[in-house]
Amino acid sequence: MCLSTLALSQQKGPAEELPKLEHLSADQVNPQIDPCTDFYQYACSKFFAANPIPPDRAAWGVAGPLQQWNETVLRQALEAAAAKKQGRTAVEQKIGDYWKSCMDESAIETAFTKAFQRS
């Protein structure tokens, strides 16, 4: 949960569109490589050639797009719960208020500074 929250907090701007998810298919394997010799290259070389590591990531693999999709869906749900709109349930309000309190960086910085000034 902490890593997911960290990843969500590092996304810039409004929630983005959902990334496209690729499904497994036979055309994603490299038929020029013998699977008995190097199964990893047989199964993954086409993916890595078509999907370089994004500049904001340290690593990227076949699960990367799914992780990005999950982070985007989670962020959209949290931002929707944080929107002060009529008809929110008590649970949505609690989730939204908690999310908003964690993401309000200026209020966090102000409280942090005041805590040190009192010491």
Image: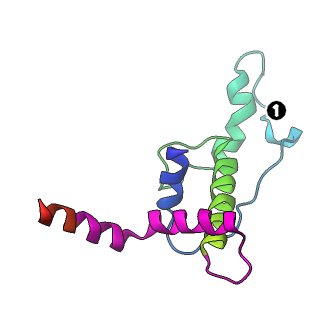
- Taking the view exactly as shown, the residue that stands out farthest to the bottom is 86
Please indicate whether residue 30 sits to the left or right of residue 1 in the image.
right
Q: Where does residue 14 sit, x and y in percent of width and height?
A: 57, 75
Q: Is residue 9 magenta?
A: no
Circle 1 residue: 31
Q: Which residue is nearer to you in this view: 55 or 13?
A: 13
Please provide percent x and percent y for residue 64.
63, 46
SS at mark 1 in the image? loop
Q: Is residue 102 visible?
A: yes
Relative depth, front residue between 21 and 38? 21
The relative height of residue 21 versus residue 3 in the rendered view (above or below) is below
The amino acid on which the numbered mark 1 sits, given as a three-letter code, is Pro
Main SS of residues in magenta: helix
Image height of 3 relative to 87, above or below? above
| Image coordinates for residue 1, horizontal then vertical, percent | 56, 44
Query: From the image, which quarter does the C terminus lie in?
Result: bottom left
In this view, the residue farthest toward the front is: 90
Could you tell me which residue is drawn at 71 percent across and 75 percent down?
88
User: Magenta stretch containing residue 104, yes or no?
Assistant: yes
Residue 30, by quadrant, is top right
Q: Where on the picture, by quarter, is residue 117?
A: bottom left
Crowd band around label 1 with a 10 angstrom C-alpha radius: few (<14), some (14–19), many (20+): few
Q: Which residues are magenta?
A: 83-112
Q: Identify the residue shown where x is 62% and y is 40%.
A: 61
Q: Residue at x 13, y 64 (%)?
A: 118
Whether residue 16 appears in this view of the structure is: no
Q: How many marks?
A: 1
Q: How is the image coloured?
A: rainbow
| Residue sitting at the far right | 26
In the image, 93 versus 102, the foreground residue is: 93
Left or right of 9, for residue 41: right
